Amino acid sequence: MPPRSSTVDDAEVDRFARLADQWWDTRGKMAVLHKFNPIRLNTIKQAACRRFGRDEKKLDALAGLRILDIGCGGGVLSEPLARLGASVVGADPATSNIEVAKLHAAQSGLDIDYRATTAEALADAGERFDIVLAMEVVEHVADVELFVARCGEMVKPGGMMVVATLNRTLKSFALAIVGAEYVLRWLPRGTHQWDKFVTPNELEIALERAGLRVVDQQGVIYNPLADRWQIARDMDVNYMLVAERAS
Amino acid sequence: MGSQSRARESRSQGERGAGRVPPGYKKGTMTDDPKPTRTDVLIAGGGFAGLALAIALRQGLGSSFAVTVADPAFARTGNGDGRASAIAAAARRLFETLGVWDAVAASAQPILDMVVTDSKVDDAMRPTFLTFDGEVSPGEPFAHMIENAPLIAALTQKAKAEGVTLLAEAVATFEPKAVASRLEVQLAKSGTVATRLLVAADGARSKIRERAGIASHGWDYDQSGIVTTVSHERDHHGRAEEHFLPAGPFAILPLTGKRSSIVWTESKKEAARIVALSDAEFHVELERRFGLHLGDIQAVGPRRAHPLGLSVARDFIADRIALIGDAAHVIHPIAGQGLNMGLKDVAALAEVIVDAARLGLDPGTHDVLERYQRWRRFDTAAMGVATDGLNRLFSNRSDVLRLVRDVGLGLVDRLPVLKGLFIREAAGLVGDVPKLLRGEVL
């Protein structure tokens, strides 16, 4: 391969490299996301091992499963899933995110199919997956029901979908908006709009209309003493739903 | 190591002329360096902690997870400095879970009870202030004594059987980097190894700790521990004795056969003098302290004086680096807890790495290592303070302090609940105990 000659390209690559460092610095701007990652990975992996009869202790527990990670960002969730053997498609509408994710996957020596595209476009193209993930995205989309329907379309018979999002409660306003964005400054202000948050009930109805049945739901709470997120019954703020399509 | 020699060749050719890049290597910026050997975890130091961690990781994560241990001592034979170790019940469970205990069980002497006395060297009577029946649960002694050599041999053999790569060489240096997917480590002979995590199990004067810029706080006790082995006429019946003599504790720890391991504390100067004595003079000094209750005694094997100190590393982790065992902390041997603390590090770090890797997470990242540090640092500080306090209380000629400690020990002796807690704490079974120490597989 000849060396790059265009200075524009080099500048772009430098910018993405800096962005990648930000995405992947577990103590930097994305610290909250990295702290949140183990708990959602655990839920996805457990549900997948149950659904597809895999051994949770194996390092290639997800081998051969085709997974779609919608809103993959810099690839923080896609990479561990690929490491567990899954064949991952990471989709994000932001081209810069996709460039960052590609760059980092190459550094990590992982083969991930990153695409700058949307869930709708993938559904239109007739893509099908064993597992569709919509982790921390439904609170950002314009039409939740339509989005869930298009994601659900892509779940193969016998497959599953996992959704993680924020509930629309007084508590979530206090913690996720006031707490996380204004007091603790974990997230930039304006990251979330509270009125776009979705209740578990609304989400379950949307999933059922898409032909999926909710088989598990759990709350996620932050334990400040251990500085760790953990599974809880309390679904007032962060929560995850696991839904399956009959085979 | 074919790729290594090729690697070195290509670099020297690159230096000679820009046009002479060997085929297969790109000329350019980022990918100029040829690919080094890769491993998932590189452990520097093949002592108890390093080998036990390597075995635990392979057993938990399987053959696709590459574990390498580098230690120049692998090239040496006859690992006999005559030292022995007390293996607490929790540590024994870890060795059982790893499948190495069976191989050493015959060389391990259970400690069936323990006697603590407080006296001056030539006191005819040594009043007993504390006795322990040494069982944490029926049939499970709270500790075993074992010589280091057979245990290291059993661990080395198990590590080989589990497919751990053992390299008989030292970690030369590495370049600390904040954000990178691997840490490039230079080994003395094999060249560069790119690892996701470097574990410093390289002892109290850890070179890796120093290179990573982690300070270590502590102090010297101006005491040395004289270590030797004694054979005696009568059977010890599995009894351990700790005599608090004015210069510090004198411990008689039962070994298999009619033998005991001696850990004998003196001031540094006095210890150096005693170690240098002729055999006959040494025998006199030894017998004055040992007593005649086990009949005739004879010092067998080498005798050495080890300086005593307390030090705890300010951090147990750095970017893609974790410290375990003596590299993280050295405490006073008064309570025989040094090795057991190292194995607690092993159990905690193994569990943290296995949990992360099973989620597909990179085990060398800060979040993963931070969990290990939180788990171990508080416990270590507490144990350091406790052993330091014990030593200060007991290494003393003051009669007032002697009265205080004797009343204290007498009270402990009369309160079964407190005594039970002491035994369980000494056995390593108190607090948030990692799985391996509870005898559970990862």
Image: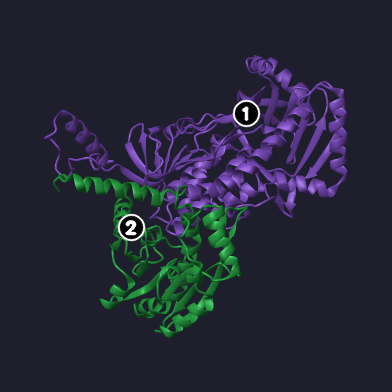
Chain colours: A green, B purple
Estimate the x, y position of residue B225 in percent, counting from the top left.
Answer: 66, 26
Residue B19: image quadrant is top left
Q: Which label number is shown at residue A97?
A: 2
Q: Residue at x 48, y 68 (%)?
A: A165
| Front residue (pair A138, B37) | A138
Residue B253 appears in view: no
Residue type for callout 2: Asn
Label 1, secondary structure: give it.
strand
Label 2, secondary structure: give it.
helix
Kindly identify which chain the residue marked by label 2 belongs to.
A
Packing grade of label 1 (10 A; few <14, some 14-19, many >=20) is some
Q: In this view, does A26 lie to the left or right of B314?
A: left
Q: Nearer the viewer, mark 1 or mark 2?
A: 2
Packing grade of label 2 (10 A; few <14, some 14-19, many >=20) is many
Estimate the x, y position of residue B381 in percent, counting from the top left.
Answer: 65, 38
Q: Name the residue under label 1.
A: B218
Asked whether the beta carbons under mark 1 and mark 2 sit within 8 Å of each other, the answer is no
Residue B163 appears in view: yes
Q: In this view, does B326 lie to the left or right of A212?
A: right
User: In this view, which residue lies farthest toward the left?
Assistant: B19
Residue type for callout 1: Gly
Estimate the x, y position of residue A147 in percent, counting from the top left.
Answer: 38, 76
